Amino acid sequence: MSYNVKDISLAPEGKRKIEWVQRHMPVLEHIKKEFQEEKPFEGITIASCLHLEPKTINLGLTLHEGGAEVAMTGCNPLSTQDDATAAGAALGLHMYGWRGETNEEYYENINKVLDHEPDILIDDGADMIFLVHRERKELMDKIIGACEETTTGIHRLKSMHQDKALKFPVMAVNDSYMKYLFDNRYGTGQSTFDSIMGSTNVLIAGKTIVVCGYGWCGRGVAMRADGLGANVIVTEIDPIRALEARMDGYRVMTIREAVKEADMLVTVTGNVDVVSGDDFKYMKDGCILANSGHFNVEINKEDLEKMSKSTKMLKPDIKEFVMEDGRKLYLLADGRLVNLAGERGQGHPAEIMDMSFAMQTLAAKYLLNNKLDVGVYKTLDETDIHVAKLKLKAMDINIDSLTTEQVAYLKNWEEGT
């Protein structure tokens, strides 16, 4: 088994963490048992570029139980947990990655995964898919398709398809109900504040927290901030989402207005330069800046550096910027997604990733069993329903079903009352 990890001796600790998350991922464990019998991926190589932590290793093990040869690397240099990668290697997966990779090492590890000549790609942010299209075109004929995990990656892939640059089908797992309704909202909401509070030890109650973006991730962050007692302000570019945020009880204003009141600001848009330039001039002394979007481009670090007279690291994931007028601003996790790149970041809870990774496994199986044209495809609604039913069963929750009469009533367009 080939691997390149920081320290293989960390495997026992990583295995204990994997055992813990498996206890809290019953849907994936159910699918794993089915895969052990069916072996749907026999003879297939699956390459992934995901956050390397215990829950993700469990996804790799599930695919491996289904017969696949699995090669994994990280989609963020600061989100890898070295004990988890060591455990993955010890358990039979090809693992490449360590926490704190340089940019060069990051792409070297993606290429090492691609050297296994995969049939299916599972990506988070689309870096691996993009690299294949740009530099590893010799792999195109073998690749059946890919699955994409996050909003940012879907945006990139849809743009590629629109420009006729995409060369194989991609399942937009992020757009499935069982992904964005739970992972993006409840997962991002909780894990963002788990990490922020773990790193800073600040009180959330009573603070004014600005949430930039009110997509499903932004909704989750705002909801958790509100639940912790914060005064929440939302910034948006979409008039419908802005109206929704206001009717959900939050104040809505422009970023320039909002930063003047912010004790803490969290970006969750997936776009570049959400906070930049003169925005930093209007921030209060002590404002904490964090990003929960996939790439570290939402808070413009270059502008922040240029406008500060000095900087220093207070902790491994807290950087202090002293502005010309003496104000101090604090950037968490180098502007990378704080819920995983933060010193105390663990990512989404296992119960959440249970559903998201179940969708990944079933999307990969669908790609294998169905010849699709080039494009970006939403997962089937039936798959969402199947995963939801498995989750409810694992939670010992029963729900009602329609009677024969109710089904007939809904189909009879002639009856009004």
Image (spheres, helix red, strand yellow):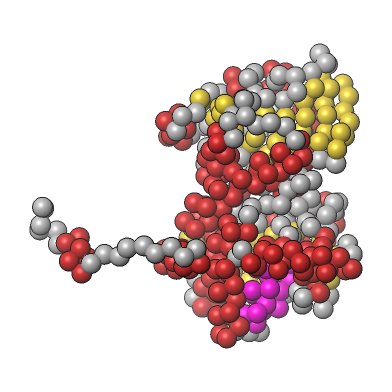
Q: Quadrant of residue 26?
A: bottom right
Q: Is residue 58 magenta?
A: yes
Residue drawn 83% across the image and 69% down it: 12
Q: Percent x, y for residue 49?
A: 70, 61
x 76%, y 67%: residue? 16
Residue 9 on the magenta span: no
Image vertical order of residue 247 relative to residue 371, above or below: above
Find the magenta span and give its range.
57-73
- Examine the rendered structure and indicate whether residue 156 appears above or below residue 304: below
What residue do we see at 77% from left, 25% from top?
A: 329
Q: Position of residue 317 (x, y in %)?
A: 81, 40
Tell which residue pokes out farthest to the front in this image.
396
Point out residue 141 in the picture as x, y percentages from the top left corner.
Answer: 64, 74
In the image, residue 376 sits, relative to residue 314, either above or below, namely below
**Quarter-of-image position of residue 3:** bottom right
Query: Does residue 314 appear left or right of residue 34 in this picture?
Result: right
